[in-house]
């Protein structure tokens, strides 16, 4: 009996964890995702940007250094750790007591000694502990999905900031060309005034040139501001150089059907809410288990005189509290279900809107690059020749010049919009577009 008691106490001291087998997969996924954060930030090898970085270089650095993403990962790690805390069994520490019987007689000291062991408080049935771990596992799944959502949000923010910076750079270059053209117009107007032409053309040309130069200075200021914002995402000094940043179109030759198939159902926020709903169902079941009695086993011996084992059944008496716990869990379930339904509706609408905006940007790119830009360039060449020969007026030339500027700006804006919508679709879908399986269909959204 003494050997059995010692072995039992040894088992209780080491304990075990009662949890779903799938919880181990969640832990492995969390560990794999945490490879960039295995070392303290000061000891890590942070990927630096090359002289002329690509958006892939920038994204790789952002994923390694972003503090918000790292915080989301450690939220996940904390949630995974709570699984073993909730599933640890036995659920109560063991209390070991010693008594020594005083009195006369020739009884041996060993036979006067009583050793007893039992839990300090009532311990739960294993099914209750397992259910606690199951609820914690669902919460860990939801937190993991939110880490994925944070990753794709960071990716979207980085790509939007990258393309905004590239767009401003293109706008500055276009405005520089516009200033050069207006300089040529003013020089032409100066020549015409010397030849007896109207003075007002020169004044207008000079005014338009000054306004264009002011606009160029403002655009260069905006470019530096956007550079600071992009460097902040990359955890670099605000004025750190970013050279040759361009809008590079990503080749994604997929149909709308493929995009929709990838779409809303894979959204990490919706997956997180689905895990929460499963967890709320488990929480209701856990609350209902409070009606089950707990137990408190005990054992002991008095020297070689006697041995004993026993158990106490602990009956639940806080019935109003248990009913309130069940009501709370049911209300929490309804709350999460309502959030899931609204989020699903919002996400579906955002997803469709992003696809429509993507296709419209692609249409604009094709239309302006193939048709409008060449036509506008031909028109400006004809207008310059007509103005130089005196067959057309200054206002006609300026109007044509502004049209060419607007056309070029619209084209680069459409290119930037396309890349931003691709990043938004990836955020909503929770997947990189390069991983989409192409659906062999020609059906597109109207």
Image: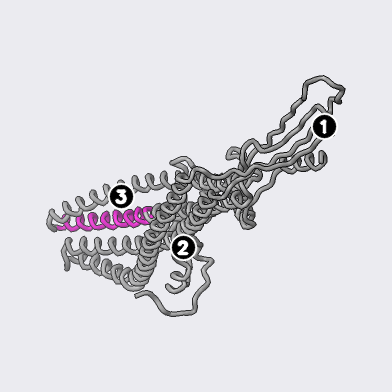
**Quarter of the image that includes the N terminus:** top right
Location of residue 270 with respect to 220 vertically, above or below: below
Which label's residue is closer to the chain start, 3 or 2?
Answer: 3
Along the viewing direction, whichever of 37 and 339 lies nearer the viewer: 339
Per the image, the residue denoted by label 1 is 303
Magenta residue span = 168-195
Name above or below for residue 165 compared with residue 1: below
- In the structure shown, which secondary structural element does the residue marked by tag 3 occupy? helix
Q: Is residue 169 magenta?
A: yes
How crowded is the residue under tag 2: few (<14 C-alpha within 10 Å), some, or many (20+)?
many
Q: Nearer the viewer, residue 157 or 128?
A: 128
Image coordinates of residue 176 in percent, x first then y, are 33, 54
CB atoms at circles 3 and 2 under 8 Å apart?
Answer: no
Q: What kind of element bears circle 2? A: helix
Q: Which mark is residue 429?
A: 2
Instruction: Mark 3: give few (<14), some (14-19) or many (20+) Cα within 10 Å.
Output: many
Q: Is residue 227 above or below residue 346?
A: above
Q: Position of residue 414 (x, y in %)?
A: 35, 63
User: What whole-number distance in Å separates the C-alpha atoms at marks 1 and 2?
Assistant: 69 Å
Q: Nearer the viewer, mark 1 or mark 2?
A: 1
Taking the spot 57% from the left edge, 45% from the top edge, the residue there is: 315
Which circle marks residue 45 in the picture?
none
The image quadrant where one finds the C terminus is bottom left
Judge depth for marks 3 and 2 and give the one in front: 2
The answer to whether any part of residue 51 appears in the image is no
Q: Earlier in the sequence, mark 1 or mark 2?
A: 1
- At horizontal 30% and vertical 68% (from top left) the residue drawn is 377
Which residue was labeled with disc 3? 216
């Amino acid at each position: 009996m003494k050997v059995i008691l010692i072995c039992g106490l040894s088992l209780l001291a080491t304990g075990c964890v009662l949890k779903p087998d799938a919880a181990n997969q969640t832990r492995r996924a969390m560990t794999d995702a945490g490879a960039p954060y295995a070392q303290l930030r000061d000891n890590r090898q942070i990927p630096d940007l090359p002289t002329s970085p690509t958006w892939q270089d920038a994204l790789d650095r952002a994923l390694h250094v972003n503090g918000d993403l790292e915080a989301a990962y450690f939220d996940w790690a904390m949630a995974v750790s709570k699984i073993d805390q909730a599933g640890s069994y036995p659920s109560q520490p063991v209390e070991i007591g010693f008594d020594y019987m005083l009195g006369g007689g020739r009884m041996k000291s060993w036979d006067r000694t009583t050793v007893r062991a039992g839990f300090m408080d009532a311990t739960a049935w294993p099914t209750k502990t397992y259910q606690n771990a199951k609820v914690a596992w669902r919460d860990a799944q939801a937190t993991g999905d939110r880490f994925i959502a944070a990753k794709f949000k960071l990716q979207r923010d980085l790509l939007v900031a990258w393309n905004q910076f590239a767009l401003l750079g293109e706008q500055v270059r276009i405005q520089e060309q516009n200033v050069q053209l207006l300089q040529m117009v003013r020089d032409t107007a100066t020549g015409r005034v010397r030849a007896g032409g109207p003075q007002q053309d020169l004044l207008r040309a000079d005014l338009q040139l000054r306004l264009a130069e002011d606009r160029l200075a403002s655009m260069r200021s905006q470019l530096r501001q956007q550079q600071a914002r992009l460097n902040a995402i990359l955890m670099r000094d605000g004025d750190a150089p970013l050279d040759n940043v361009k809008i590079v179109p990503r080749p994604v030759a997929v149909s709308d059907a493929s995009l929709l198939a990838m779409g809303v159902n894979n959204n990490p926020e919706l997956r997180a809410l689905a895990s929460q709903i499963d967890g709320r169902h488990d929480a209701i079941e856990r609350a209902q288990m409070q009606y089950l009695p707990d137990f408190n086993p005990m054992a002991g011996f008095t020297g070689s005189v006697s041995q004993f084992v026993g158990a106490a059944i602990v009956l639940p008496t806080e019935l109003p509290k248990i009913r309130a716990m069940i009501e709370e869990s049911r209300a929490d379930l309804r709350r999460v279900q309502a959030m899931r339904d609204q989020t699903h509706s919002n996400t579906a609408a955002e997803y469709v809107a992003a696809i429509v905006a993507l296709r419209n940007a692609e249409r604009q790119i094709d239309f302006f690059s193939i048709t409008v830009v060449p036509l506008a360039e031909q028109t400006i060449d004809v207008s310059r020749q007509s103005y130089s020969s005196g067959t057309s007026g200054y206002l006609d030339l300026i109007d044509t010049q502004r049209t060419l500027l607007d056309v070029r700006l619209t084209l680069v804006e459409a290119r930037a919009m396309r890349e931003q919508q691709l990043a938004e679709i990836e955020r909503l879908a929770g997947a990189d577009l390069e991983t989409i399986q192409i659906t062999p269909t020609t059906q597109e959204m109207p």
